[in-house]
Amino acid sequence: MRRAPVASGVANRGARLDQARAELDSRDWHGLVTTPGVNFAHLTGVALDRSERLVCLGLPADGEPWIVCPAFEAERLSAALPEIRLAAWEESEDPFARAAEWIALSAGARWAIEPSTWFHDATRLGTAAPDVQWVDGAPLFEALRRSKDAAELASLGCAIAAAWSVYDEVVASLLPGVTEREVVERISAASAARGHESWSLVQFGPSSALPHGEPSDRALEPGHAVLIDWGCWVDGYTSDLTRTFWWDGEGAGSGAGRAEFRVILDLVRAAQEAALETMAPGVACGTIDEAARRVIRAAGHAKRFTHRLGHGLGREIHEPPYLVAGSADPLRPGDVVTVEPGVYLPGRFGVRWEDDVRVTEDGIEVLSGRSPHTHS
C-alpha cells in the first residue's frame, strides 16, 4: 500500500508545535527531533521526502523550533516554513554535527527521537551529541496524533466520500474476464480523475480467502466472491474500507448468491455489529476485539478469523490504537478506528467487512455508513 504525499498546510502549525511542547513538558523531556515522514508533516504541515541528506526538525521544550537542512534546500524550506529558523549545511559539511550544535544547547537533557527515524541517522545523532540522553518519541507522537481534531475529521470524511464514489463507479463496470490487477488500476484511475491518490487490494474467488493477498492476474468469473479493500487520500488522510460480495455475472450482489457465502457474510456483519455495540470511551480495545470474536467463535469459525479486529486510522493506514486481543488500551474520544472482522475459508472464499468509526465523548459515530447492501 503506497502512502500518498501529504499536502502542505500552515493553518494549525503553531497549535501543533504548542501541543508538542506540552507533551514534552509533561514527560520532563527537553526537546524532540523528527526527520521527514508523517510526524514531520503533522507538526509542520509540510511533506518532505526522506533521503540520505539529513533534514530534521528540532523542537526544544522551552524554545523555538529549528530545522537542519541542506543549503540547496534552504530557500524552498524557508518559503514553506518562514517562522522556523533554518540551519543549513553544505555538502562538504557533517550535517549531524550541525544538528548537534543546536541540540547541545540542552546538553545533558533528554531529547525524544521520532520513532521512524532511520537507524543510521539516530546513531549518528547520538554520536554527534553524546551528552544528550535519547528517548523513544513514539508515546509522544501517538499522543499528538491519536485524537483527531475537526480539521482532521473533515479530511477523513472527504477521504471516505471519495472512496465510496470510486467504489460505485468501479464495481458497476465489472465484467467477466477482468483481472484483479485491472480492477486495482481502475480504482487508481478513478481516484486520480477525482484529484486523489488511492490504494487497494482486489481479490476474486479463492484469492479472497487470503486476508491480505496481493492482486494477481486471476480473472473474474460468475460465482466468484469479490473482496475489495481500498481507500483514498485527502489532505494526507486516508479512508480504509472493505466490502465483499458475490458476483454472479449480472452485477454486484445480484441474485441470491451462493448460500454458504450468504451465511458467512451475515456472520461477519453480526460480528461487526457486536463490536460496534461494545464500543465506547474507556472500553479496552481487547474487549471490543473479543466481542466480535465471540460471535465468530460461536459459529465454529474461530480459527478462520485470523487477524485483529481493527486499527487506528489517519495519516497512516495503520496507526494506534489497535483493536487486538488482550489489549487493555482504552478507547478515547477522538480516536478513529477501523472495525473489520473477517472469516476466510481456504480454497473457497473469504469475507471481510470494514467500516471507519469515530469515538465520541459518549459513544461512537460510524463515519463510513453501513447497510445490508453492497455499496454502503
Image: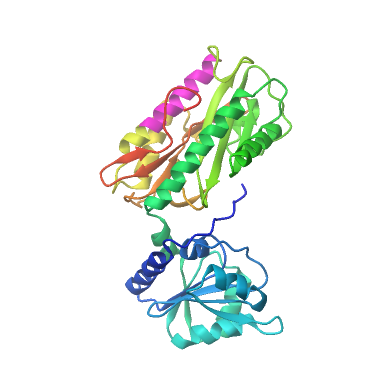
- Residue at 59% x, 72% y: name it: 55
Does the magenta stretch mainly form a helix, a strand or a loop? helix
Q: In this view of the protein, which residue sits in the foreground, 301 or 163?
A: 163
Image spot of residue 284 (x, y percent): 33, 47
Number of marks: 0
Q: Residue furthest top?
A: 255
Q: In this view of the protein, which residue sits in the foreground, 128 or 367?
A: 367
Stretch in magenta = 258-273
Q: Is residue 246 left or right of residue 64?
A: right
Image spot of residue 375 (x, y percent): 50, 26
Residue 163 magenta: no
Regarding residue 140, the answer to whether it shows in the image is: yes
Q: Is residue 224 left or right of residue 150?
A: right
Q: In this view of the protein, which residue sits in the foreground, 328 or 126?
A: 126
Compared with residue 291, is residue 111 higher up or lower down, i.e. above or below? below
Compared with residue 82, is residue 342 higher up or lower down, i.e. above or below? above
Q: Residue furthest left?
A: 362
Compared with residue 20, is residue 253 higher up or lower down, i.e. above or below? above
Regarding residue 325, the answer to whether it shows in the image is: no
